[in-house]
Every structure is written in C-alpha cells, then in structure tokens.
Amino acid sequence: MGHLTYVAMLVFVVVATLPLEVLLRTRVYARPLRLGLTMLCAGVPFLVWDVVAVEAGHWFFDPDLVLGLDVPFGVASLPLEEVLFFVVVPLASVLTLEAVRSVRGWTVGDEAGDRR
C-alpha cells in the first residue's frame, strides 16, 4: 500500500479543492487560458528544478512510495506522481485563492463587466 502514498496525497488535494468551483462559484474552469498560463508559470520552473536536482543526485524519490511509472525528461526521469504534483498543486492554489476572493469579495480588475 505504501506505493500509493504520493497518489493518495494528490487525490486528497483534488478532492478537498475541486468542490470550491461549484460551492463558491470561483469560475476557475471558466477561464481556461488564465488557468493554463498560471499553471505553466508555476509548474514549469519547478519541474525543471526537479529534473536538474534528480540528475545531480540532490533529490530522489523513494521507490516504495511511488507507482513506479516514470516520465522521461531527457537527462532524468520523474515519477508520474511528481509531474502530476505540478498540475494538482497550482490548480488547488488557484481554486483556493479564488474561493477566498469569492468569500471576501476581493476584486482584482478581471471581473465580468470591468472595463479597466
């Protein structure tokens, strides 16, 4: 069961944050370009950092805690769960931020009808 540890953490994060879209009407999925750019800016640098750290021997993944499915990145490979981490965590972060904005009534100038 240990090999499901990382996957379980990712599932927990998704299950905990996805309802925010529906319950608080965050409209994160209604703005796919904005979400995609955010995830790209947040995920790619850390993914590159991970690949470099693994290749240099500064970072590793316990094979007993991952599925054993690796995604190759030229010089190194990362467990599938690590790649998904850079999708799940930025998504959860955006959903959480938008949920707080929704509850608090914070505006940033991108609201519907705003002409700035």
Image (cartoon, rainbow, N blue to C red):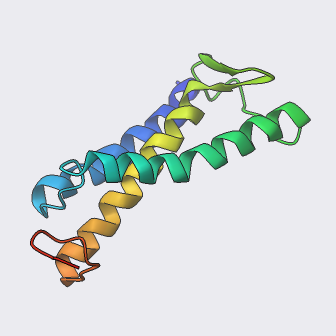
Q: In the image, what residue occupies the spot 24% across and 81% down?
A: 107
Residue closest to the far front: 115
Q: On the rendered image, what quadrant is the C terminus found in?
A: bottom left
| Quadrant in the rendering for residue 15 | top left
Q: In the image, what residue occupies the spot 72% across and 30% down?
A: 62
Task: Indicate left or right for 2 with 107 as reference.
Answer: right
Residue 73 horizontal/vertical position (percent)? 70, 23
Task: Indicate left or right for 93 with 86 as reference.
Answer: left
| Quadrant in the rendering for residue 49 | top right
Residue 48 horizontal/vertical position (percent)? 70, 40
Q: In the image, what residue occupies the spot 75% across and 20% down?
A: 74
Task: Indicate left or right for 21 with 85 as reference.
Answer: left
Along the viewing direction, whichever of 81 and 114 lies nearer the viewer: 114
Vertical relation: 62 (above or below) 9:
above
Vertical relation: 71 (above or below) 26:
above
| Quadrant in the rendering for residue 63 | top right
Task: Indicate left or right for 72 with 38 as reference.
Answer: right
Along the viewing direction, whichever of 36 and 3 lies nearer the viewer: 36
Residue 16 horizontal/vertical position (percent)? 30, 52
Q: How many marks?
A: 0
Residue 27 horizontal/vertical position (percent)? 17, 57
Q: In the image, what residue occupies the spot 21% across and 58% down?
A: 20
